[in-house]
Amino acid sequence: MGRIAVVGAGMGAMAGAARLAVAGHRVTVFERTETYGGAVRRAERDGFAFDTGPGLLPLPAVYRDLFVKTGKEPLEDCVELVQVDPSARHVFADGTEVSLPNASRAGVVAALDDALGAGVGQRWGDFLVRARETWDRSRRPLLEEPLWPNWSVLAEREPYPAVPHKRLLRTRRAGTLAEVGAWELRDARLAALLESHALVHGLDPRTAPANAAVLPYMEYAFGTWYVRGGLRELARAVYERCLARRVEFVFGAEVTRIVEEDGRAAGVELADGTVAEAEFVVAGTSPRALDGMVRGTALRGEGEVPARPGAPSRLTVLLALRGGRPEGTAHRTVVHAEDREAELDALFGTAPGLPARPTVTVCRPDDPALVPDPGHEAVTLTATVPAAVSTELRAQADRMIAAASRAVPGLHDRLLWHEIRTPADIARATGAEGGAVPAPALAAAEGRLLRPANTTVLPGLFTVGGWSHPGGGLPHAGMSGALVAGLIVEGPEFRGSQ
């Protein structure tokens, strides 16, 4: 077995490193910052602690599989997973509210009927049935297999079974998520519920393909989970699993060049001039950062999915509140924008900017580890913002707090202090230009939302993480690590787990 150099200690990179070490490889991870986890970070102050990256874990089976395949201790022996119920509370623009049970289609249908009117829930339930068919059609090629060489088939084929929509003399089928909401759900609040699942990933529902229906389906089918102590605990567990498998980590080590020898990757060169030789290199970096390391070598051949570094970012506001968390409080509340079209125009228009009234996700974990004592509460607010935005962010944070007050009674009176985490902070943690956050891969849309294959034109060089197949998000990062490990261990004939 050979030596493998991994660039970056993000979740996908660590997932791949642990699997490769179990296969007998000598793995060294070079991380330019002083810690692991990529965007999965924690902020602490005055006894309060906050997740500054993802706050919830969908599809935990990905990490359960990682721990099964890399050691004797299962995931639940290393972290405490808590199923969040209700999955989410939604506060709509017209003031109506609904709390949706976790992983219960029947429960969700009943809750929507009770809150929004008879028959509304059934329309959502029927949509989830179509979303399940979309998941069954797209799950394996988009998530569990290396990207197909004939990837254009995925780019052209829309797997969502849209319902025919008759208008005047024409019959049409939804091609975008917004059209699914307008034509099939036929309720502004249901449409907002649907579109929020795209917006949280930085996707414009007006251009996101209809098969983005898999995003809410994953949540309602497999549940939403919290890691006690915060999602940073998941990163810690994966890091410690790597150490247990004798993966070596070198922190504060910036890779500046991929060493090439005899037409293949042969190691990495660090900023101090040190060269670490390796038979394989796995890069968990953004496309632009990787391009700078190969110095002119084209990594994607003609006809392959191109690297698309552009994506929105997120603004996070950390709130320290006096007074304990009231019993029965929902872990997550989505406060919907009063004018969704204006919000989307601001975020995704020709000159992206900050919406005056953003959609805000409010996370209120029931977790004593995050507060100094039971008489306080730690709350995290997140909203999608353009990447690289640097001005007016404090004003936007104030707007987010104002929106969150619709979900947290007495918020302003309880507020001790607040801090913000900006796209620049994400850029420093992950190296992504402007703090961009990649979305999960999706089919159709002419391949705009597919990510490049984990292999590259340069033999011996592989890519892992959100900027390569199968895209962004915690589950997708874990899947990416599994795919890269399979390609290295089994070779080009690897076709994914069975």
Image: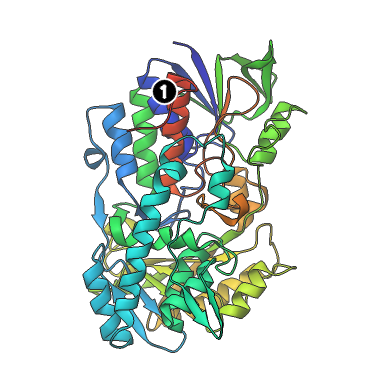
Q: Position of residue 419 (x, y in %)?
A: 53, 64
Q: Position of residue 387 (x, y in %)?
A: 65, 58
Q: Position of residue 5 (x, y in %)?
A: 54, 21
Most distant residue in the right direction: 296
Report the side of 112 relative to 450 (left or right): left
Viewer-nearest residue: 80 or 472: 472
* Amino acid, disc 1: Leu
What residue appears at the point 51 percent right and 19 percent down from the top-left corner?
A: 4
The figure's colour scheme reads: rainbow
Most distant residue in the front direction: 169
Quadrant of the image occupied by residue 74: top left
- Give the residue pinned by disc 1: 20
Decide: few, some or many residues near mark 1? Use Cα within 10 Å; few <14, some 14-19, many ≥20.
many
Report the side of 147 relative to 231 (left or right): right
147 w.r.t. 168: above or below: above
Viewer-nearest residue: 288 or 179: 179
253 w.r.t. 308: above or below: above
Quarter of the image with the C terminus in it: top left
Report the side of 225 relative to 441 (left or right): left
Viewer-nearest residue: 17 or 116: 116
Quadrant of the image occupied by residue 398: bottom right
What residue appears at the point 34 percent right and 66 percent down from the top-left corner?
A: 128
Quarter of the image with the N terminus in it: top left
- Asked whether residue 246 is in view, the answer is no
The local secondary structure at tag 1 comes to: helix
What residue appears at the point 48 percent right and 77 percent down from the top-left corner?
A: 165
201 w.r.t. 299: above or below: below
- Asked whether residue 63 is in view, the answer is yes
61 w.r.t. 423: above or below: above
